[in-house]
């Protein structure tokens, strides 16, 4: 059945279609065999399935324990389908009918005209949406369900419904049907070849490619800001960037990136490099580049990352510049480590960090979002057992967890594009960086999961590091605390609540977009604005309602905040010309280590 507004699929070349079907079956057999090898060897993956079954099974038990409510829920679903069928019959007779269930306006899965104009595909789409929303209501309305279990059920249900979307399958997606007929199935053969390549790249586990890997190279067209490595130890290389101004602020600046990803998210290319922009404002910028750890680093814990990371970097900056004091910024978990370091220094009388910029950083994990799904006692024990075998957590597992936060955008859109349409993904530097995974040392990651996500020890004043109990309330230095409105990793509410834990002045700023795009938003081509509104007190909703909206990037606002604290300038410093010689050009060697 076709719509009068769109041409029917062309008649395929049946000989070519049969030939491609044979290749499809042959390649599919090889791929399935490869995917089964890790399972046969007892590799991980079943733990997540068990957790999913437990959470959703608990929801089902709550409904089945009350037969009356169960019948009412089934009746609501039946009524919705009766209404949909009636609406579809009206459309089949040539008359318009309003939709029973419409997708969200920003949902790209159903953008093709046939999803609306063709009654058959419109029925499939609406039936899917009815089932999804009914299932979501079952989880949301299950009485007596503890909130952690409800949260897990919501998360895992989203994974299932995203996977089962009719947009993911050839026979239920009009766009895919048209393309498959037009290419006589050649798209499916190409897709399976790419699937095989991605399984091989993942050493038996599927790693869905999100960008054209061959288009980028660290140091060639990403991470290209000039500078030099001026210090190296087992955990870090410290990069000092070359100045672009005659004078610079006297106080040097240290960036503490997350070790869950590589630092060059802040230096993707000259047009959107936060590091280059900072240098252009007259900052002497130093950035930590964390090692991509292996079994040798298994015992490197959170204290090691503080002492051999931040504190070692500050010592090296002092040697390079002669300055005892620094300003520092931490991004994501790098910001959490910076907060821990500030609390430790406040407790021990160390006053070398004079201001802190926290970028999408959590210090209070009460409202930590969907990543808490992976951080209950049972799952942390499983992760610890897995890490004990190698001494580290494989980077692909962390990358998969982040992708699951937005499964439609970061998983299934690429599955359809790559393996069904048979199209290689476009060259996109952000997604190249996203796939450049890093491993996590066992001791460090276990401490982070337990103390932050499970016990929220830092916010409660119960975290102990180096035999020192940490209290963020003793941190009196100025803090610039940036959150982003659509952050799935460090939710805006979580960052807002964390602001109250510090004992000094905190400037809470809310940027548009999410965890990456809201931070990497250069003034030359800003995509999003930001909001300012004074101290982070009361409810976030009230703060936003009273806040002042600003067009453009938050970067100039931040630099004014920073410069006002220590405006004195000195002649620009050249990397390697001071007491610390260059150990090699930026971006160094650690960032090139692949997982």
Image (cartoon, rainbow, N blue to C red):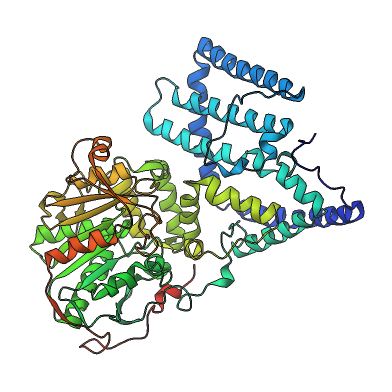
What residue appears at the point 62 percent right and 38 percent down from the top-left corner? 165
Quadrant of the image containing the N terminus: top right
In x, y percent, where is residue 264?
40, 69
In x, y percent, where is residue 443?
34, 59
Quarter holding residue 94: top right
In x, y percent, where is residue 359?
29, 56
Closest to the observer: 501 or 16?
16
Q: Residue furthest left?
A: 349
* Residue 209 as seen in the image, left or right of residue 307: right
Q: Compared to 160, does 249 lie above or below?
A: below
Q: Compared to 245, does 485 lie above or below?
A: above
Quarter holding residue 163: top right
Q: Compared to 193, does 67 lie above or below?
A: above
- Number of residue marks: 0
* Residue 53 as seen in the image, left or right of residue 374: right
Closest to the observer: 217 or 507?
507
In x, y percent, where is residue 138?
50, 24
* Residue 130 as seen in the image, left or right of residue 230: right
* Residue 249 as seen in the image, left or right of residue 270: left
Q: Residue furthest top?
A: 68
What residue appears at the point 25 percent right and 80 percent down from the top-left corner? 245
Residue 235 seen anywhere in this rendered image of the structure: no
């Amino acid at each position: 059945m076709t719509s009068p507004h769109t041409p029917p699929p062309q008649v395929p070349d049946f000989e070519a279609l049969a030939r491609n079907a044979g290749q499809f079956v042959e390649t599919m057999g090889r791929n399935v065999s490869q995917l089964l090898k890790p399972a046969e060897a007892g590799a991980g993956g079943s733990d997540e399935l068990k957790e999913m079954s437990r959470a959703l099974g608990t929801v089902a038990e709550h409904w089945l324990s009350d037969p009356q409510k169960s019948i009412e829920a089934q009746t609501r679903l039946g009524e919705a389908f009766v209404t949909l069928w009636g609406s579809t019959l009206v459309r089949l007779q040539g008359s318009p009918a309003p939709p029973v269930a419409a997708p969200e306006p920003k949902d790209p899965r159903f953008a093709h005209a046939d999803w609306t104009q063709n009654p058959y595909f419109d029925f499939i789409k609406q039936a899917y949406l009815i089932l999804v929303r009914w299932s979501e209501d079952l989880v949301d309305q299950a009485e007596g369900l503890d909130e952690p279990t409800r949260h897990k059920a919501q998360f895992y249900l989203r994974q299932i419904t995203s996977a089962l979307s009719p947009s993911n399958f050839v026979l239920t997606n009009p766009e895919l049907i048209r393309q498959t007929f037009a290419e006589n199935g050649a798209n499916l053969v190409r897709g399976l070849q790419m699937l095989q390549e991605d399984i091989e790249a993942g050493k038996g586990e599927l790693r869905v490619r999100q960008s054209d890997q061959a288009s980028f190279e660290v140091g060639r067209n990403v991470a290209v800001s000039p500078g030099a490595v001026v210090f190296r130890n087992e955990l870090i290389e410290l990069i000092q960037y070359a100045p672009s101004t005659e004078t610079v602020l006297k106080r040097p600046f240290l960036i503490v990136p997350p070790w869950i990803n590589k630092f060059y998210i802040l230096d993707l290319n000259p047009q959107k490099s936060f590091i280059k922009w900072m240098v252009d404002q007259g900052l002497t910028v130093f950035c930590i580049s964390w090692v991509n750890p292996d079994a040798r680093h298994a015992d490197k814990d959170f204290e090691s990352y503080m002492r051999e990371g931040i504190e070692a970097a500050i010592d090296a900056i002092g040697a390079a510049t002669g300055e005892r004091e620094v300003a520092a910024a931490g991004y994501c978990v790098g910001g959490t480590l910076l907060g821990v370091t500030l609390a430790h220094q406040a407790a021990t009388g160390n006053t070398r960090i004079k201001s802190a910029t926290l970028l999408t950083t959590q210090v209070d994990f009460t409202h930590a979002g969907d990543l808490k799904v992976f951080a209950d006692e049972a799952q942390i024990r499983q992760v610890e057992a897995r890490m004990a075998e190698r001494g580290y957590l494989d980077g692909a597992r962390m990358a998969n967890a982040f992708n699951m936060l937005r499964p439609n955008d970061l998983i299934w859109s690429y599955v359809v594009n790559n393996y069904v349409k048979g199209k290689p993904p476009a060259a996109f530097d952000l997604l190249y960086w996203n796939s450049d995974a890093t491993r996590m040392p066992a001791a460090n990651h276990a401490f982070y999961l337990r103390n932050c996500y499970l016990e929220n020890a830092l916010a409660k004043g119960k975290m102990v590091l180096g035999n020192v109990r940490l209290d963020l309330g003793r941190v009196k230095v100025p803090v610039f605390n940036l959150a982003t409105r659509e952050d799935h990793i460090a939710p805006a509410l979580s960052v807002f609540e964390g602001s109250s834990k510090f004992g000094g002045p905190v400037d809470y700023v809310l940027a548009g977009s999410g965890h990456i795009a809201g931070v990497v938003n250069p003034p030359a081509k800003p995509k999003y604005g930001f909001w300012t509104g004074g101290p982070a007190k009361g409810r976030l909703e009230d703060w936003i309602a009273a806040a002042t909206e600003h067009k453009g990037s938050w970067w100039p606002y931040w630099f004014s905040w920073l410069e006002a604290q220590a405006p004195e300038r000195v002649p620009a410093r050249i990397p390697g010309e001071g007491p610390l010689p260059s150990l090699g050009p930026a971006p160094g060697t650690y960032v090139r280590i692949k997982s």
